[in-house]
Image: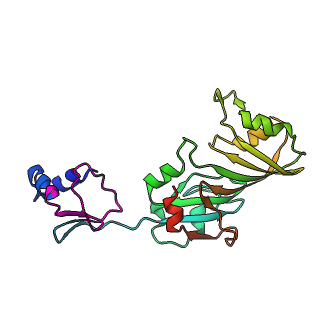
Amino acid sequence: MRIDRLLSNLPRFNRQHVRLLLAEGRVRVDGLACRDSRFEVRAFHRVEVDDELVQAGKPARYFMLHKPVGVVSATSHPEHRTVLDLLDEPDKHELHLAGRLDLNTSGLLLITNDGLWSRRATAPDGSHAKVYRVETEQVIDPAAVEVFAQGLYFAYEDLTTRPALLEIQAPHHAKLTLHEGRYHQIKRMFGHFQNKVIGLHRQSLGAIVLDPDLPPGAYRPLTQAEIASV
């Protein structure tokens, strides 16, 4: 909500009074004077008028989780454990996932209560590359490198995938960098070569890399640098 609207909704302030308060620098957001009436106030902002606290703000929370195979990327599920079940945190119901991983995919998963941040992290503009380790049932065809780089046509969606970087590291193992996240995209891309994906692990999203000290099922808060990278 815009800050002028937030303050105008309080019974003791009218629009003219709010404009004056802002112009005089008497409104502070997170300790800094705010004079912009269009400033968008979020739930995490602390808002004060003179010495009066108008909105305390709640802490923004950001976590990286090493998702294990067999755990659902959801906040609730009738049959399987969810990633939130792995967290020992208060008010878990306020948290949500920034992206998801399939049941049988492991690796980096981001969890937060900051909706704007998670939308940036998962923006469809491809600004945050996702890197995966892939294990396949058959030997990886070297021709896939060029085909993935050019993009594959998915008839169901009537679209061509964005260029992807495939680095073959062993006959059945590769590193794949994507700039999008279509439904079962990696499995479908390798399926184009009649090669089944039998292991999939996400190593990173943008500049955020899964902590090598985190065992499957463990998590930690993101650092300020990791948060700011999104």
- Residue 79, relative to residue 186: is it above or below? below
* Residue at x 53% of width, y 68% of height: 223
Which of 85 and 39 lies nearest the eye of the viewer?
39
Q: Position of residue 81 (x, y in %)?
A: 63, 62
Q: Quadrant of residue 67?
A: bottom right
Q: Which residues are magenta?
A: 22-47
Residue 34 in magenta stretch: yes
Q: Position of residue 54 (x, y in %)?
A: 22, 65
Which of 43 and 130 lies nearest the eye of the viewer?
130
Which of 105 and 82 lies nearest the eye of the viewer?
105
Q: Is residue 76 visible?
A: yes
Q: Is residue 207 left or right of residue 112?
A: right
Q: Position of residue 162 (x, y in %)?
A: 65, 36
- Residue 98, relative to residue 225: is it above or below? above
Q: Position of residue 183 (x, y in %)?
A: 65, 41
* Residue at x 32% of width, y 62% of height: 45
Count of all numbered marks drawn on residues in the image: 0
Asked which colour scheme the image uses, the reply is rainbow
Q: Quadrant of residue 71?
A: bottom right
Q: Main secondary structure of the magenta part?
A: loop
Residue 23 in magenta stretch: yes
Q: Is residue 10 visible?
A: no
